[in-house]
Amino acid sequence: QVEYGKSTSYGSVTSIGSPLVTAHNVSLSGLDAQTTYNYRVKSKDAAGNPAVSLNHTFTTAAPPDTTAPQVSITSPRDGSSVTRGYVVTISAQATDDIMVSKVEFYVNGSLMCTDTVPEGANVYKCDWRVPKRGNATYRLQAVAYDTSNNSSLPVAVSVTSK
């Protein structure tokens, strides 16, 4: 029999296991995530002599992270113009319920750079040199990832070079 709970007062107990076994497994359900529990085992030998173990502890795991981060491109603005041959800093703000691990930046579907260290309020950046060729429209995208490798949906803005 196992007594268990969030303190050494226990509070919960399992049913008595099969008699005359040398090993016994017990499954516990309804436990809280990321919580330390105390437990002790009560048993009897073949002659009926009782024994109680010392207190032990275990900590339950965190629930799996299934929430994707959120990301938005803050600069340049959708529909803005950029100058050919100049460096433009693409900025994105990314947040997550646990932690953002990186933001990837794409130009016309090609990965330009990855930023893993935010500046200030969860702002990630990528410097992009606008091609010198004639006027063109570019699709800039950002995708955020968290530490569980969940990813945001890509967000995009379009800019025109002049």
Image (cartoon, grey):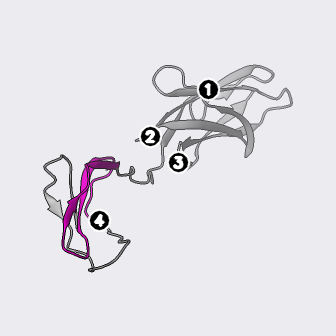
Q: Which residue is mark 3?
A: 148
Per the rendered image, the range of residues in magenta is 29-58
Q: Amino acid at mark 3?
A: Ser
Q: Nearer the viewer, mark 2 or mark 1?
A: 2
Residue occupied by mark 2: 96
Q: Is residue 55 magenta?
A: yes
How many marks overall? 4
Mark 4, secondary structure of its residue: loop
Which of the two marks, 3 or 2, is nearer to us in this view?
3
Q: Secondary structure at mark 3?
A: loop
> What is the CA distance from the residue labelled 4 to the residue labelled 1?
47 Å
129 with respect to 49 (left or right): right
- Mark 4 vs 2, N-terminal side: 4
Residues at discs 4 and 3 in contact (Cβ within 8 Å): no
Q: Secondary structure at mark 2?
A: loop
* Cα gap from disc 4 to disc 2, whole angstroms: 31 Å
According to the picture, the residue beneath numbered tag 4 turns out to be: 28
Question: Residue 62: x and y, percent?
Answer: 39, 49
**Residue occupying image coordinates x 60% and y 35%:** 79
Res 97 quadrant in image: top left
